[in-house]
Image (tube, rainbow, N blue to C red):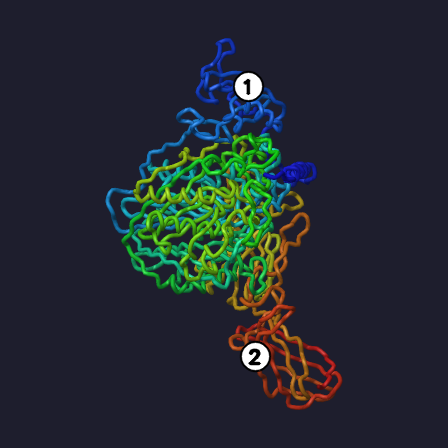
Amino acid sequence: MRSSNLPHLLAALIIALAGLTACSEPDGPADTPDATDEDTDINDVGPDADAGPQSCEFQSECAPGTYCDTEAGECVPAPECGRRDQWASCVNAFAEIAPDLARRTSCIESTCVVHCALDSHCPAGNVCTDNGNCLPFTGELTGEHPGGDTPAPLQAGVANVLMKFPIGLSMGGYGSRAAFNAGRYAESLRPSRGQMHGLYARGLALDDGTRQLVLLRAPIIFPSGALHEAVARRLQEETGRDWRSSLVLSGTHTHSGPGRHWHLPAGEEAPIPLGTLGTDEFHQEAFDWLTDSFTEAALAALDDLAPARMGWDVVESFDVDDVISSDRWGATPAFDDNRVLMLRVDDLDGNPRGVLVSFGSHGTHNSGDYMTGDALAGVERGLEKALGQHYDRHVPVMYFNQNGGTMSPRGDRYGHRGPQIFERIGEHFAERVIEPLTQMETTTEWSFNGHTQRFSIQVDDLGYEPGEFAMENSPTHEGEFYHGAFQCDLPEDDDPSTHAEPGEFGCMGIHQIAFHRPVTLFGKSQVTALQLNDLTIVTMPGELAMELGWDIQRALRDAWGIDPFNSFTWGYAQDHLLYLSPTNVRGERPPFPGHSLVGDLDDYPDFTFSFLQGGYEAQMGTWGYKFGDYLVDRAVEAVGIMRGEDVTVSVPVPLPDEFAPTGQPNFPMDPSDPDDVGRIIDQPPAQVERRQPIDITWRGGDPGAEMFQAPRIALERADGEGGFEPVLLPSRAPYDNRESVFMTRIRQGEDDAWEWGAYWEETKDFPLGTYRFLIEGHYLNADSGERTPYSATTNTFEIVPSTAMTIDQIEVLSPTTFSARLAYPAAGEVLTSGPAGDRAKLIGSFRMHHPEVAAGLPIPVMADTEFNTFTGEVRQGESALNFTEVTVSTELETVEGRSNVPVTRVIVTLDGALSEGEADFDLQLTDTLSNNGELLTTLSVDLP
């Protein structure tokens, strides 16, 4: 081992982060634990002091100030210590007394306390949880799977449930959003200030007569084991069946979804506010909201069960040009399988009811203050648009992340920015999968199976040699990382002939984030194996690398004969252990035709495809380089058990995750003036040109009362009979802010009343007519104490053709000809630009107005499909020259340093000759959609 400066750097980081708490300017109340709460880390139930030594078998049976001497079978005085951060003295004391206890001791109230790390450290019926405490397990493990007794044709149900949370809740994903006490619903991160669209929990329920499965996905950073258990229990309460092996929870991995649902150590248990790392501090009500959302989606899918047909397919080589996602792990050679899994559920008449798609990516384009499903929502909505146009019905699409840990989202090839990227990536995706999806064969004959395998994670089970997963000078027992470690000192090494040597690099031990207590989040986990006819799926609890995904598929082939073309892996599912990297992938090249690997794996040196190559993906792993193989073994076990194979489980099987309720108070909610809510502040203008952005604002309710998420604003069109009717999108979804056609924000007025805004723009081909906006929301009524609905409509307005088409870059080519560029205005990147009281106010364009033109560049009037007329005259002195011929073409050019940009130019032939000197150009342009523009300018003519 070699020493490292990393601990000293981390200590400086801790001090710096702690110092931030004194600098923030709060916009609202913080949610902090009651300062009078007593420390519950030590068991406060013990024998009378005069009753003599207390017999014991487990540490939790001893009173404060004592520990269980298991050899003597009695509670004895515990060593004394100083502050919580002086836990090393407890490690040293127990190293002399009972070395096995030195790994799980900490200092609480000046006494060394021994914690549990496994359920076996607790009395029967207890679960080791809450970072080293034994608590009664309150669940019921019956093993009675949901389903009936007789095989039957397929029934399926689809759910699309608006998630339960308020705008203002902090978002999970980026530590760069760190801020302290910046809003009611945020503690260590900035609050959200708006949303780009509604965020939905979506579900698929499947029933073959004997087994039911429910697959759920939500636009969150990731789910946890505790969340899976909470939802499974809710379903068990509703159905009487044990859903733990029949329920999958997946996070799309957007970095802009609701946060505060991960049970990180907090308060006195943590040396810094760990929520600043990107998830914000845990809050019980936020966790309950997410539990409700998943549960409601599951129950809605089950309620929707009806006779159905279903098919599945994998489109190979679907993204070999990396326009949708690309390999981001620069430490290893390119390793991208370029596969997308698709399931389509139809009714018995062949009408699609829902679609599931899966490939690897990240949701990391947005880091601002608007909630969004990011690139993954763009994929879903892009395919929904194509399906709506194909089938004339709305078909919900649900994205399940695959091996996204080493993949980045793209959609930026043509220079789109912000939400424009999401629209572009959705169009890319739909173009590539719509044909095989619509041609997919379906059947009513299905057979399902599933098994969830829980497992403990102890360093002794990972196979490390002494010193391999350790660091010199670490105050832990024998320097080992027995609670795990991350942020390892592993810079990206893109040279396959070299790699880091185990034990010779420093890491931040997990013990450092909890004063040496075992952190429950990283001490156990679970994987789920699913069988859908001949398709085998295995979930992984974290950011799964492509390389590790293949290692699992190959191991399933070798162990159980499963064809890799019939298997798939889902990361970000069932639990989360940060990044999951391979140990040392060897063997042949994966057989998938679009795989990016050059040659066979064995053509490269050992550890070319390994955690030991470093980079961010390795640095954010929690159990070192041997954890990849450990997970492969767990996947093989889970699939084998599901299949009924003879499997020997080699590691302890813990009880499901269960954390004690925190007792945090629910978030407050302010009442609103009933006579004020629904009052429109900023009305739309009487006429709105196509592509003209407008901003509608109104008095609304408190964000907690408006929940779910934001109030609804919808577009309605005059029906010609004195009324208005809802507008539908091409996806056949309602035209409202639940879709990506508004950006909705919140602010507070000068009187602190809550106000809402909706930023809206449309495209150059939007139908003309008379429109209005309908607003529907809720406020808290002070008299009744109830959430009360309100509604309002804006003034009507006319959508009219754009007059903003542009004519520029006039060039005289000869005495009788000149050229000009014909365009629509550029779509600039959407940006926040509001004052302090309205920080999320927007300018710019969030819509994509041309698929191949970058943000900020003029958009061509396409010669073959959009150009209509170009007219006018050129006056020089007393002469007026008219047009005799107009030729228009669109060609690729280099514009502002960007190559292959489509540009439309017109060449005009005049009925007379120009001479040198000034000339007045009076030009008019129209397109086939009645949009128009004009130019009146004087130019100096220099003949060539």
- Horizontal side, residue 569 vs residue 757: left or right: left
* Residue in front for this viewpoint, 101 or 58: 101
Q: Is residue 687 visible?
A: no
Circle 2: element type: strand
The C terminus lies in quadrant: bottom right
Q: CA distance from mark 1 to mark 2?
A: 86 Å
Dot 2 surroundings within 10 Å: few (below 14), some, or many (20 or more)?
A: some
Q: Residue furthest top?
A: 50
The image quarter containing residue 386 is: bottom left
In the rendered image, residue 227, in percent from the top left (x then y), is placed at 45, 39
> Element under label 1?
loop
From the image, tell me which residue sits under label 1.
Answer: 78
Residue under the image location 53 percent in, 25 percent down = 40
Quadrant for residue 37, please give it.
top right
Q: Which mark is residue 660?
A: none
- Whichever of labels 1 and 2 marks the residue nearer the N terminus, that label is 1
Q: Is residue 749 visible?
A: yes
Residue ID for mark 2: 889
| Residue 104: percent from left, percent from top | 52, 28
Instruction: Mark 1: give few (<14), some (14-19) or many (20+) Cα within 10 Å.
Output: some
